[in-house]
C-alpha cells in the first residue's frame, strides 16, 4: 500500500486545516479514543484523563505534531518517525490493535471539524496515510 | 450481550431522529467502497464504480445504502435485542451473500465518520462512543449466525 500523487496532495491540504487547530484536534482524538475504547486508558495510568487535563492536552499536541512530521516527510515517513518507531517497539509496546483505534478517532475528529473538506477521497487518503504511519510505528515490534 | 445505558440510548435515538436515511445510507456505503476498494467485490453487478464520484453518484449504490441503513433503524428500535433482530439477516449474509463479518465493522466505522461530518460538534465523544457501541453490537449480531 503506497500513496499516489493525488493522495499526497489531499493529505497536505487536509493537514493545513488540521494545523490551524493542531493541539485541539489531537486532544479531542485522544478523548474520543478513551471514551469509545476504555481499554486504551490502560496505557495511561499515570495521566489525568479528564476533559481539560493539561496532560491530555500536551499529549494530544505531541501526537498531532508527530503526524505533522510524517506529512512534511511524506516520501520518507520511515526515516521521519524512526525514533518514535523505536520508542513504541521497545519502551511503550502499545499493542498494534490500538493504532487502528486511534487512527479511526483521528478521522472522526477531522470529519467533525472539517466536514466540507473531508470528502470520500480525503477520507480514503487519510485512512491510507494513517495506516502507513501505524505500520511504521509497529515495524520494529518483532 | 451488549447493554446500553439510558444515556447511550438517548444519544443514539437523538441522532437517529435527525438522520436522512436515504442520503446517509448512500454516503456511508459509497465511502466504504471508496476508502476500502476491496469491498467492491460484492458489487460487481452494480455498474460504474470506476471513481469516487461514480461510486457516490451510482443509483444502485444509493438504493442499497438506503436499504442497509433502514435496517439499522431496526437496531435503533431494538437496542436490547440486537441478536434476535438480525438473526435472519445474519443467516442471509453468511449463507447467501458470503460476506466476511469484517466488512460489517468497516461499514460501521465509515458510518460513524459520516455522522461526524453531519453532526460536527454535536457528535461529542460521548455520543460518538454510544454509536461505536451500536455499530459494534450490530456487526456482532450480523455475524452471530455464521457457521
Image: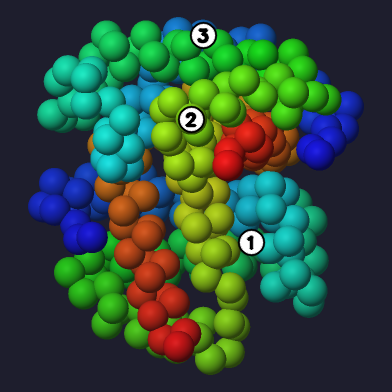
Say which of marks 1 and 3 sits in front.
3
Q: Which residue is mark 3?
A: B20
Q: Are marks 1 and 3 on the same chain?
A: no
**Disc 3 is attached to a residue of which chain?**
B
Q: Quadrant of the N terminus of chain A?
A: bottom left
Q: Which residue is mark 1?
A: A57
Report helix, strand or loop for mark 2: helix
Q: Is residue B33 left or right of residue A18?
A: left
Say which of marks 3 and 2 sits in front.
2
Which badge, 3 or 2, is on the more N-terminal residue? 3
Q: Are marks 1 and 2 in contact (CB under 8 Å)?
A: no
- How far across and how far down the image is residue B30, in percent? 33, 25
Determine the residue positioned at 37% across, 9% down: B63
**Disc 1 is attached to a residue of which chain?**
A
Determine the residue positioned at 52% across, 24% down: B92
Q: Are marks 3 and 2 in contact (CB under 8 Å)?
A: no
For residue A124, above or below residue A1: above
Residue A79 can be seen, yes or no: yes
Report helix, strand or loop for mark 3: loop
Q: Are marks 1 and 2 on the same chain?
A: no
- How far across and how far down the image is residue A99, in percent? 51, 63
The 10 Å Cα crowd at callout 2, few under 14, some 14 to 19, many 20 or more, is few
In this rendered view, identify the residue nearer to me: A75 or B1. B1
Instruction: State how far apart marks 3 and 2 are (Cα).
Output: 31 Å
The 10 Å Cα crowd at callout 1, few under 14, some 14 to 19, many 20 or more, is many
Q: Looking at this rendering, what residue extends furthest in the bottom direction?
A: A90
Q: Are marks 3 and 2 on the same chain?
A: yes
**Disc 2 is attached to a residue of which chain?**
B
Q: Which residue is mark 2?
A: B95
Amino acid at each position: 500500500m503506497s500513496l499516489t500523487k493525488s493522495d499526497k496532495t489531499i493529505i497536505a491540504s487536509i493537514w493545513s486545516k488540521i494545523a490551524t487547530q493542531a493541539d485541539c484536534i489531537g486532544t479531542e482524538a485522544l478523548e474520543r479514543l478513551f471514551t469509545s475504547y476504555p481499554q486504551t486508558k490502560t496505557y495511561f495510568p499515570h495521566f489525568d484523563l479528564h476533559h481539560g487535563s493539561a496532560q491530555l492536552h500536551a499529549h494530544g499536541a505531541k501526537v498531532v505534531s508527530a503526524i505533522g512530521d510524517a506529512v512534511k516527510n511524506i516520501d520518507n515517513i520511515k526515516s521521519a518517525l524512526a525514533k518514535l518507531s523505536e520508542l513504541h517497539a521497545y519502551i511503550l509496546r502499545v499493542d498494534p490493535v490500538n493504532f487502528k483505534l486511534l487512527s479511526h478517532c483521528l478521522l472522526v475528529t477531522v470529519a467533525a471539524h472539517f466536514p466540507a473538506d473531508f470528502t470520500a477521497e480525503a477520507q480514503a487518503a487519510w485512512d491510507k496515510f494513517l495506516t502507513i504511519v501505524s505500520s511504521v510505528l509497529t515495524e520494529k515490534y518483532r | 450481550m451488549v447493554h446500553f445505558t439510558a444515556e447511550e440510548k438517548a444519544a443514539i435515538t437523538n441522532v437517529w431522529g435527525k438522520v436522512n436515511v436515504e442520503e446517509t445510507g448512500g454516503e456511508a456505503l459509497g465511502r466504504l467502497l471508496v476508502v476500502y476498494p476491496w469491498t467492491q467485490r460484492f458489487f460487481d453487478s452494480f455498474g460504474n464504480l470506476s471513481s469516487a464520484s461514480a461510486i457516490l453518484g451510482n443509483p444502485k449504490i444509493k438504493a442499497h445504502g438506503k436499504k442497509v441503513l433502514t435496517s439499522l433503524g431496526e437496531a435503533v428500535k431494538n437496542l436490547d435485542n440486537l441478536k434476535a433482530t438480525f438473526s435472519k439477516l445474519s443467516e442471509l449474509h453468511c449463507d447467501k451473500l458470503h460476506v466476511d463479518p469484517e466488512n460489517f465493522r468497516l461499514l460501521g466505522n465509515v458510518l460513524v465518520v459520516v455522522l461526524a461530518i453531519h453532526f460536527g460538534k454535536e457528535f461529542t465523544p460521548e455520543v460518538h462512543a454510544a454509536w461505536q457501541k451500536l455499530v459494534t453490537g450490530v456487526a456482532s449480531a450480523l455475524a452471530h449466525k455464521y457457521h
